[in-house]
Amino acid sequence: MICSLLAACGPGDPLATTSDVDQSGAPSLDPQPDAPLQAEPSAPWFATVAARIAASEYAFQPSEAGHRAWNRAGRVQVVGALDGVSLAGRDDLSLATVAWGRDGSLQPFAPDSAGTGACQDPDLLDTAGLCLPRFERRAAQLTEWWHNSAVGLQQGWDLQIAPPGDGPLLIDVDVDRPVRGAGSTLTFDGRVLWTYGGVAAWDADGRDLPASLSPRPGGLRVTVDDADARWPITVDPLLTASDWTVDGTESYESFGEAVAGVGDVDGDGYEDVLVGAPEYDGAVGYNAGRVLLYRG
């Protein structure tokens, strides 16, 4: 029954009904013309059902490869395992936290267990009315966690004890492709443009801590100024994929070397974009080039 599956209605709900019975206790097969018509399910009930179904799509489920989830917004499959997290779909990407600590005294992150853990959000429920657990890779003093949602894929860390040494807290993550950018946002090269940013950090009192991102050989580094922090602390960046991608039609045409927004050219209410391919040959000639208009 839908009500019991979704835990969204009770005895007074229009869908929580029971069979009529006769004097012997057996179900009655006769129509009941005098019984009042049942009301249609309420709009709030439908809204609750729809929200829980949508949330359930992002839940991590056990699989042979580890724990698997689908991210509809990014159109990628997420697989969490003891050795890291990988994404597959429009483009493949792998990330794994490998070290943390202070400059000159980094210690390796070697998780001893992995699986679902704490609730991603106590208000984010599945069709059974249960919270959606995040995926975790756990070690003694550090837990790396992943929160999958329509907003994107959040990678975060809960750190229990301040590491020894001087200087800011550092967290190193291996990424299987070139990383560009610095400060608040990084991008990962590939068929799909991955954006890694929105990094935030806070201490046990909920006080914000300055945090930044930078490329490093083989991946990226998160830097947190924890000089005045009260431990434990949490660090939380966000990984998102581009909504739209397009490929060129020739090798070595430098497609996308120049990109420009040009406003709403065709008057359809959506802004359009020009993409250049300066070394395009086609039928015109060697490196004749071309510019393509993509309508919003």
Image (tube, rainbow, N blue to C red):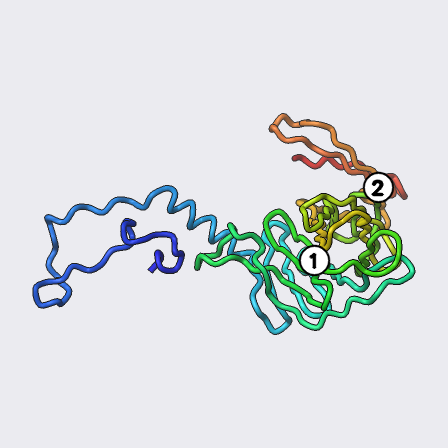
The C terminus lies in quadrant: top right
- Residue at 10 percent of width and 63 percent of height: 22
Does 265 appear above or below 251?
A: above
Q: Quadrant of the N terminus?
A: bottom left
Q: Which numbered dot is residue 158?
A: 1
Residue at 39 percent of width and 56 percent of height: 7
Relative depth, front residue between 29 and 56:
56
Q: What is the CA distance from the residue labelled 1 to the residue labelled 2?
A: 40 Å
Q: Residues within 10 Å of mark 2 (few under 14, many from 20)?
A: few
Above or below, comparing residue 262 to residue 84 in the picture: above
**To which quarter of the image does residue 76 belong?**
bottom right
The location of residue 275, given as percent across then percent down, is 77, 38
Residue 269 lies, in percent from the top left, at 61, 28
Name the element at disc 2. loop
Left or right of residue 34, residue 40 in this image: right
Amino acid type for the residue under numbered disc 2: Glu
In the figure, 213 relative to 284: above or below?
Answer: below
Q: Sequence-wise, which precedes: disc 1 or disc 2? A: 1
Give the camera-side residue of 208 and 293: 208
